[in-house]
Image (cartoon, rainbow, N blue to C red):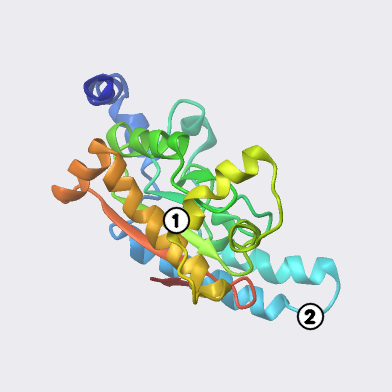
Amino acid sequence: MALPRITSGSARAAGAMSHELQESLQACTPKDALGRLQEGNARFAKAWVAASGTGTSQQRMDRLNAIWQNNCQIDPHALAQGQKPFAAVLSCADARVDPGWIFACGSGELFQVRSAGNTAFDDAIASLEYAVAVLEVPLVLVMGHSSCGAVKAAMGSEPLTPLLEQLVKPIRASLESRDDLTQAVKGNCVYATGQLSARSQVIRDASASGKISIRSGYFDIGNGKVTLI
C-alpha cells in the first residue's frame, strides 16, 4: 500500500519547510477551525441577504465585499512556496457554491475538493487523504446545498449518460423513498461523510485518534447560511 509513503512524505515536507515559511503560511490559522467557518459564513450570509434584490450589480458587489474587511491574507510570496490550509471542504461543483465566498476565506486557507453532488468518489477521498496526512488539516467538512442538480437527477427517472449514471450511483445509494429534495441533499451529504472514514484508513485513523473532526453541512443558497447536519 502507498499510505505509509504519504505519512513519511509529510515528515519530509515539514522538515524541508523553514520555520519562517511555516509561520507565514499559518498567519491566518484560527484556533477553532469550525468556529472560524461559522463566523465567516455568518458575515457572508448577512451580506448575501443585504445584496439580494437590491441596487445594481456593482452595489451588490460592494455589499459582498464588506465580508473581507476584517480578514487576514497570507503573504502571496509564502503561498508560492507552500500551503497550510486550516480546513478541507468537499462540496458541489455548482457555480453558486463557492466555499471561499461562503466562508469568507482567503487564498491558502481552504483545501477544496469539488464535484457535482459532493460525492465521496475515489479521487475526492485520495485528495482528502493528502489534506489529512500531509497538510494536517484538523477539520474536514462535507457540504451539500439547496436545489442540487446532481441529487435531483439521481432522484429522477430520465436517462443519463454512462458517466453521469456513474456519478449519481452513490447519491442513489443514500436516498430514502419518502425524501423530498432537501432531505435527499442532506442524506447524500451525511452518506458521503460516512464514506470518507469507511473507505479510507488514513481518514479513519486520524478521526479515531482525534487529529481531525469530520462534519456535514447544508448550504441554503437563498439565505446564504450553512447549517451543520
Whether residue 169 appears in this view of the structure is yes
Q: Is residue 172 left or right of residue 129?
A: right
Crowd band around label 1 with a 10 angstrom C-alpha radius: few (<14), some (14–19), many (20+): few
Q: Is residue 174 above or below residue 182?
A: above
Residue at far right of view: 56
Residue 128, quarter of picture: top left
Of mark 1 and mark 2, the one earlier in the sequence is 2
> Which secondary structure, mark 2?
loop
**Residue 148, percent from left and from top:** 62, 63
Disc 2 crowd, CA 10 A, few/some/many (<14, 14-19, 20+): few
| Direction from residue 123 to residue 201 in the image, left or right | left
For the C terminus, the quadrant is bottom left
Residue 20, picture quadrant: top left
Q: CA distance from mark 1 to mark 2?
A: 38 Å
Q: Position of residue 169 (x, y in %)?
A: 52, 48
Q: Which residue is mark 2?
A: 53
Residue 114, numbered label:
none
Q: Quadrant of residue 57?
A: bottom right
Q: Nearer the viewer, residue 132 or 162?
A: 162
Residue at (15, 49) in percent of width and height: 208
Residue under the point 50% across and 43% down: 113
Q: Circle 1 — which element?
A: helix
The percent position of residue 164, horizontal first and vertical second, equals 64, 44
Q: Nearer the viewer, residue 164 or 106?
A: 164
Q: In the rendered view, would you say 98 is above or below 66?
A: above
Residue on which the image places disc 1: 173
